[in-house]
Amino acid sequence: MTVLVAGGGIAGLTLALSLHQVGLPVQVFESVETIRPLGVGINVLPHAVRELCELGLEEGLAALAVPTQALAYYSRHGKPIWHEPRGREAGYRWPQFSIHRGALQMLLLETLRARLGAGQFHAGHHLAGYEETARGIRARFRNGASADGSVLIGADGIHSVLRAMHYPGEGPPIWNGAILWRGVTEGPQFLSGRSMIMAGHEFQKFVAYPISRPLYDAGRSMTNWIAELKFPADHAWRREDWNRAGDTADFLPRFADWIFDWLDVPALIRGARHIYEFPMVDRDPIPVWTHGRTTLLGDAAHPMYPIGSNGASQSIIDARVLARELRAHGMTTAALKSYEAERNPITARIVLANRRNGPEKVMQMVQTRAPAGFERIEDVLSAAELEEAAAGYKRIAGFDKDALNSQPPTIAVG
């Protein structure tokens, strides 16, 4: 028998490669007919990069991604609040990578086809349902196809079919009032050329970081950026549209004077070829992921706000832990429950921490205490407050440097 995976995104593909690594058969079923490198930029944190490196993907990642050197927070006036090294510059044994989401997905997909064969990945298969059988489980798809396996993994994202089957009254994702406009702009490098910056506060924020290693090596930057505005709870917005073309008239005027000596925000926004609009949504943590021979993975299990760069990273770690447990316990409900027992509490804490603005809360603290600006950050926030905000989130999210560097591999191979 085999492991059936519904969803061919980052979570599902990482799981498939991990199962192959430990000698377990797997079939991946993806909803869309043609896989294209869509999306915008993401950050992959050192604890997740470690897992990808242990899958033999470091060389491929390094050729595509920018190794993030630093993370810096700024006020809405462009004044520095906090700066910290990231990745190997911070003493981790692994880098932090900034990469286009589509580029990472295609790297995983190409690696899967090379290692497992093209026949293990099935496009155009949208999960419709399942039933348990005498021998395991049968997944049914909207195109009329079916597949038999031992267990079924729902890696089918925030609108997961499998999750909805077990939580039919949950409803749509929860909107927190914030809208994100995202784009990618080619232009000159800023700061170190490998910096990730966040400027502003909880109700108006701008994020930018480079995502293309080839362009960086050529002395330019392919900058991924996010402009965020938060509206009152009763604000009438197009909540039903989860991914639509963005209109600069809706947000650019609010950033028109964000011209700093190290970054011209309005110029970056105007330079994007395409802009996409997303509501900031998540779902409440759920107590149970595993039902019989099924469980959830990645965004299907724990969709979270894009704060702290943890969405994709936690999905990758999910996949590795699940593969480890399936190897240890066989393709059984016991393996699924063991995986859930480890990962559900951890990811629930991150979902809730992100609702409290994660480590980015220091930006709102500055705005509250010094809305007109400041000359010295020490007059607004103490060093202890800044350091604890950063360190505390790392502990919650599982990438405290010393703990990560000393812990054994998730999957022991060889």
Image (cartoon, rainbow, N blue to C red):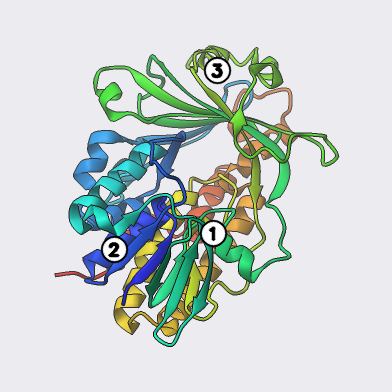
Query: Left or right of 273: which side holds 219?
Result: left
Is 83 positioned to the left or the right of 74 in the image? left
- Whether residue 409 is visible: no
Q: Please provide percent x and percent y for residue 400.
A: 41, 57
Disc 3 secondary structure class: helix
Label 1 environment density (alpha carbons within 10 Å; few <14, some 14–19, many ≥20): many
Q: Are marks 1 and 2 in contact (CB under 8 Å)?
A: no
Compute the Cα span from label 1 to label 3: 31 Å
Q: Is residue 107 left or right of residue 278?
A: left
Mark 1 highlights which residue? 300
Q: Amino acid at mark 2?
A: Ser
Residue position marked by numbered label 2 in the rendering: 18
Q: Callout 3: few (<14), some (14-19), or many (20+) C-alpha neighbours within 10 Å?
A: many
Instruction: State the image quarter where residue 378 is shown.
Output: top right
**Quick one: 128 or 95, which is closer to the camera?**
128
N-term-proximal mark, 1 vs 3 = 3
Measured in 3D between alpha carbons, the distance from the residue under mark 1 to the one under mark 2, in whole angstroms, is 19 Å
| Residue shown at the point (43%, 50%) measured from the top left | 124
Relative to 325, residue 389 above or below: above
At 31% across and 50% down in the image, what residue appears? 92
Identify the residue at horizontal 64%, vertical 58% (top origin). 352
> Looking at the image, is mark 2 or mark 3 nearer the viewer?
2
User: Badge 3 is on which residue?
Assistant: 269
**283 is higher (above) or lower (below) than 98:** below
Residue occupying the far front of the picture: 144
Question: How far apart are labels 2 and 3 at the CA level?
Answer: 38 Å
Query: Mark 1 is on which residue type?
Result: Ala
**Where does residue 111 sit, x and y in percent of width and height?**
23, 49
